[in-house]
Amino acid sequence: DPRGLYVCETGGQRKSLQVHYRMCQNCIEVDAPTISGIVLADALATLFLALAVYCVSGHHRSHTSRASDRQNLIANELYQ
C-alpha cells in the first residue's frame, strides 16, 4: 500500500510528500489472451451476423417473380 507521508532530507532541508492512492475494487487484468479472445469473438459475431443477413435477405431463386421480366407497352401510336 503506497499511501502515506514520504519525507526526504538532504543538506539540512526536509521535504515531504503526501501520497493518496485509490485501488480499483472491480478491475480485471487485460492481457494479450484476453484481448485476442475479445477480438476473435467480435470477428465471429460479425461473420455470423453477415451470414444471417445474407440468408434472410431472400436470395432464393425459386421464389423470384417473373413480373419484372415483362414489359408494359404504352398504347400509343408513336411508340409502336
Image (spheres, grey):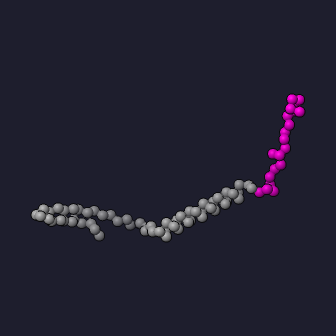
User: Which quadrant would residue 18 be assigned to in this image?
Assistant: bottom left
User: Which quadrant would residue 47 be assigned to in this image?
Assistant: bottom right
In the image, farthest residue toward the top: 78
**Is residue 63 shown above or below 26?**
above
Name the residue located 74 percent from the left edge and 55 percent from the top edge.
58
Q: Position of residue 44 (x, y in %)?
A: 60, 64
Front residue of this view, candidates 51 and 28: 51
Q: Where is residue 48 in the image (x, y as percent from the top left)?
A: 63, 62
- Decide if residue 62 is on the left or right side of residue 49: right
Q: Quarter of the image containing the N terminus?
A: bottom left
Front residue of this view, candidates 80 and 30: 80
Total numbered labels placed on residues in the image = 0
Asked if the magenta segment contains residue 25, the reply would be no
In the image, farthest residue toward the left: 12
Q: Where is residue 36 in the image (x, y as percent from the top left)?
A: 51, 67
**Is residue 70 shown above or below 18?**
above
- Decide if residue 48 is on the left or right side of residue 65: left
Q: Quarter of the image containing the C terminus?
A: top right
Name the residue located 69 percent from the left edge and 57 percent from the top edge.
54
Name the residue located 18 percent from the left edge and 65 percent from the top edge.
8
Name the residue located 56 percent from the left edge and 62 percent from the top edge.
42
Asked if the magenta segment contains residue 78, the reply would be yes
User: Which quadrant would residue 70 be assigned to in this image?
Assistant: top right
Q: What stretch is highlighted in magenta?
A: 60-80
Q: Position of residue 59 (x, y in %)?
A: 74, 55
